[in-house]
């Protein structure tokens, strides 16, 4: 059996795959957080609950509507995004002129309300959600066995992250969004509906969380607590990458997922804290984050 640093290659590659899958979810969720913070300056603590909502919407569509995985992959993010847009327009938008702490407290309360509601109706235990038959099975790569669905998660995450980065950084709509963040009055004077842009931005961030939830549903148990178990790590990813940095959120998400996977191989006892150790080191050496800009 081939060994690397005394570790069997199959075990090492297996943990790298686990790290890459976790990194895919970290990247998608931190991307949504970065979009919302970068353009709205809101620390969205409800992001984990919106991730959970995406998984539950897919599950409910399957159990009560007979709607399979592929339609749910489109419908669930749209439903969660619409829910987020309604929340932004009716409640969150009233807090923009206040201290950012009010937005954080509001989204924290919203997360507790959503999670509490789902725990009341569905309990704390998880429910399985089957992957589509077309993504079943696996591929033997020789040095490891790759489950097809896990590979699909990584590819889908990469494609969506790249698409959102191109949308924000390279399109006219993205330019409007960035300009509306810097000087909303000037942008509005050119006839741009800035409140609508902000609503769409929050809806986009919530929809990304919902998309990640649908991807995660066949991998993990669909549970009301699945978002709260992940959101603290995702916030750490955003801080390390640089608050509001789109590229930083994507790159850091994947790198930290891989770092977490490697730690499980070489020093398993530290796997639960490695992300926070890295965050502490980065904040000491570069307080603005790896891709953030110093004020």
Image: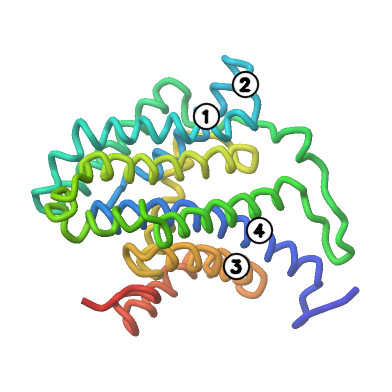
Q: Secondary structure at mark 4?
A: helix
Q: CA–CA distance between discs 1 and 3? A: 30 Å
Position of 128 relative to 185 (above/below): above
Q: Secondary structure at mark 3?
A: helix
Disc 1, disc 3: CB below 8 Å? Answer: no
User: Residue 18: which disc?
Assistant: 4
Tag 4: Cα neighbours inside 10 Å, few (<14), some, or many (≥20)?
some
When asked about the image quadrant of residue 244, the answer is bottom left
Mark positioned earlier in the residue sequence (3 or 2): 2
Mark positioned earlier in the residue sequence (4 or 2): 4
Viewer-nearest of labels 3 and 2? 2
User: Residue 67: which disc?
Assistant: 2
Viewer-nearest of labels 4 and 1? 1
Residue plotted at (9% across, 48% down) = 97
Residue plotted at (83% across, 62% down) = 144
Residue plotted at (69% across, 32% down) = 130
């Amino acid at each position: 059996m081939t060994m690397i640093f005394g570790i069997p290659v199959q075990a090492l590659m297996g943990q790298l795959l686990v790290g890459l899958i976790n990194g895919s979810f970290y990247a998608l969720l931190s991307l949504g957080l970065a979009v919302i913070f970068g353009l709205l300056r809101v620390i969205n603590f409800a992001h984990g609950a919106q991730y959970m909502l995406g998984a539950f919407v897919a599950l409910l569509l399957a159990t009560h509507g007979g709607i399979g995985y592929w339609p749910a992959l489109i419908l669930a993010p749209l439903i969660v995004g619409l829910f987020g847009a309604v929340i932004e327009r009716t409640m969150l938008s009233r807090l923009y002129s206040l201290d950012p702490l009010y937005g954080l407290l509001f989204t924290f309360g919203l997360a507790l309300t959503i999670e509490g509601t789902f725990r009341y109706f569905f309990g704390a235990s998880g429910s399985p959600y089957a992957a589509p038959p077309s993504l079943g099975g696996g591929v033997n790569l020789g040095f490891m066995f790759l489950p097809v669905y896990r590979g699909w998660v990584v590819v889908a995450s990469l494609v969506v992250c790249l698409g959102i980065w191109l949308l924000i950084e390279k399109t006219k709509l993205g330019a409007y969004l960035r300009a509306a963040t810097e000087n909303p009055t000037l942008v509005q004077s050119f006839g741009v509906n800035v409140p609508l842009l902000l609503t769409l931005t929050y809806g986009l961030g919530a929809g990304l969380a919902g998309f990640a939830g649908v991807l995660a549903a066949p991998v993990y148990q669909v549970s009301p607590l699945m978002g709260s178990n992940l959101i603290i790590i995702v916030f750490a990813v955003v801080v390390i990458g640089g608050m509001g940095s789109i590229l930083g959120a994507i790159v850091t998400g994947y790198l930290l997922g891989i770092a977490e996977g490697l730690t499980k191989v070489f020093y398993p006892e530290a796997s639960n804290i490695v992300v926070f150790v890295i965050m502490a080191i980065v904040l000491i050496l570069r307080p603005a984050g790896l891709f953030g800009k110093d004020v």
